[in-house]
Amino acid sequence: MLLLFPVPYAALASLFFTSATLIPQALTSQQPATGSLTTPQLVSHLTTAIASLKSLRATVDARERINTKYITALSSIKLTTKPLRIYLKNQKGIEVLYVTGQNGGDAWVYPGAFPYVTLSLDPMGALMRRDQHHTTLQVGFGTIAELLEGSEKLQDKAFNRSFKYTGDSTFQRRPCYVLRSDYPQFRYITYKVGKDESLATIAARFGCGEYRIMERNSLTTSSQLTEGQTLQVPNAYGKRTFVLVDPKSSLPLAIAVYDDRGLYERYEFSNVIANQVIPAEEFTKDYKGYKL
């Protein structure tokens, strides 16, 4: 067994996610697009800015729907992309440190509660992914870029092409561009598992994320799929999606995704500092102030 002590599941599950209300306000105050910026230009600026990230510091205020409830948290994050190094801490005192090539591929996790012992956990394992839409390794903006561009394995990019620049607004007292996707054909379809397919490959094929497949089919991250098995799979990531973009940095300020049941997930980013060198010692267990 990997763990010697019980881990507070609820605390780990709320690692990334407090109630956020600013996105609806921004949409209410939206002004129509003036025509000086096109959708392809805005998408290109956004995806290029994300791809060019070398480092990032930010505060993430987020909300995810888990079954019929919402899990919320406020987290401070910092990361570098090459190599991938991630540190985050939420308002409950939970800390996570992941450094590529260290700790046997595991993350160091301080639970912020009894037994107050730092654990080594697989970031792709069941415990760290329990009741979460995304993995620790997906912290940042990469998932947003995939929503707009689609992965190489995506079979149909109709959802990605549905994003439109619909106007300007303000968010966190800052101007922003509004990218909106309306995809009324969002639905769950019956899918028969092919040879050697996994949750990850099916999610990539439909661009829907793994969590919804697991939730709808009562699966876990460790579930082994069999050829011919029938699953209910979303045909896209969302029914309605909003991305608010900072005109200066071209990075996301917020994203909200809705599906057939309402709000699916919402993330708001503040105190964003991009491409400023982060000292290597800030990605060590012994850095001043860490409890890892």
Image (tube, rainbow, N blue to C red):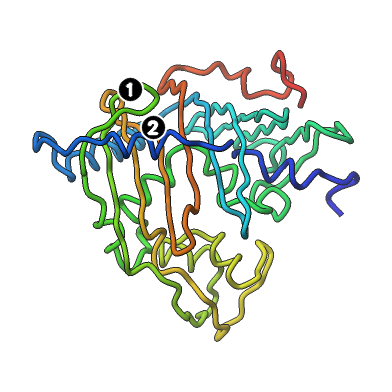
Q: Position of residue 134 (x, y in %)?
A: 56, 49
Is the residue under label 2 in contact with that under label 1 (CB below 8 Å)?
yes
Q: Is residue 250 above or below residue 290?
A: below
The residue drawn where x is 83% and y is 33% is 113
Q: Is residue 168 above or below residue 239?
A: above
Q: Amino acid at mark 2?
A: Leu
Task: Say left or right for 201 vs 169.
Answer: right
Instruction: Residue 215: name its quadrant.
Output: bottom right
Q: Decide: few, some or many residues near mark 2? Use Cα within 10 Å; few <14, some 14-19, many ≥20.
A: many
Tag in front: 1 or 2: 1
Instruction: Residue 246: name its quadrant.
Output: top left
Task: Say left or right for 190 vs 90.
Answer: left
Q: Amino acid at mark 1?
A: Arg
Q: Position of residue 62 (x, y in %)?
A: 54, 39
Residue sitting at the far left: 35
Q: Nearer the viewer, residue 174 or 77?
A: 174
Report how many numbered discs are placed on residues in the image.
Answer: 2
The residue drawn where x is 43% and y is 17% is 276
Task: Say left or right for 179 vs 32.
Answer: right
> Sequence-wise, which precedes: disc 1 or disc 2?
1
Q: Position of residue 280 (x, y in %)?
A: 58, 19
The residue drawn where x is 65% and y is 69% is 219
Element under label 1? strand
Instruction: Residue 41: name its quadrant.
Output: top left
Give the residue number, with chain letter if any, for mark 1.
174
Give the residue number, with chain letter if any, for mark 2.
253
The residue drawn where x is 72% and y is 24% is 285
Q: Nearer the viewer, residue 47 or 172?
A: 172
Element under label 2? strand
Task: Say left or right for 26 vs 130.
Answer: left
Q: Decide: few, some or many residues near mark 1? Use Cα within 10 Å; few <14, some 14-19, many ≥20.
A: few
